[in-house]
Amino acid sequence: MDAFIPELNVQTSVLDEDDVEQEKEDELRELCLIMRAYLRGEGRIEQRRRLFRRGTVPVLNVEVDGREWRLGRNHWSVR
């Protein structure tokens, strides 16, 4: 399951190989909450320096259910 924001070129995914339907529903719900928070303007956009090239890349920080999601172009993390 993926969530992609084309305007910022950032994304996140949930990888679940289990057969437990409730876990899949919970993870899909969390992705939807992240996207809803972004659409409501609740996220914070940072510009981070590129590692090997000039310029910056956007990183979206969104807090959902007490957890902070950081969405980037090729990575995401949850704290």
Image (tube, rainbow, N blue to C red):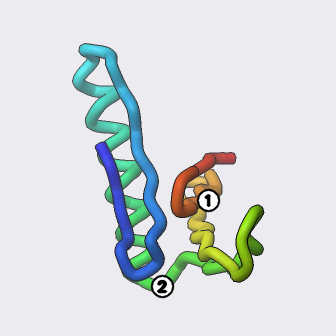
Along the line of sight, which residue is nearer the eye, 6 or 26? 6
Amino acid on which disc 2 is placed:
Gly
Badge 2 crowding class, 10 Å Cα cut-off, few under 14, some 14 to 19, many 20 or more, is: few
Q: Position of residue 68 (x, y in %)?
A: 64, 56
Q: Position of residue 55 (x, y in %)?
A: 70, 82
In the picture, the quarter occupied by the N terminus is top left
* Residue located 23% across and 24% down the image: 21
Q: Amino acid at mark 1?
A: Arg
In the displayed orientation, state which residue is furthest to the front. 53
Give the answer, above or below, for where 65 lies relative to 10. Answer: above
- Which sits earlier in the primary sequence, circle 1 or circle 2? 2
Task: Say which residue appears at 40% left-offset and 49% top-offset.
Answer: 30
Determine which of the numbered discs, if any, sits on residue 62 in the image.
none
44 vs 13, nearest the viewer: 13
Query: Element at badge 1?
Result: strand
- Is the residue 2 above or below the residue 6 in the image? above
Question: Mark 2 sits on what residue?
Answer: 41
Reading the image, the residue beneath label 1 is 70
User: Up-down: is 32 above or below 62?
Assistant: above
Q: Is residue 2 left or right of residue 8?
A: left
Residue for point 35% across, 74% down: 6
Mark 1 to mark 2: distance in Å?
Answer: 15 Å
For disc 1, the neighbor class at 10 Å (few under 14, some 14 to 19, many from 20) is many
Residue 55 in the image: above or below residue 18: below
Horizontal side of 38 relative to 55 (left or right) equals: left
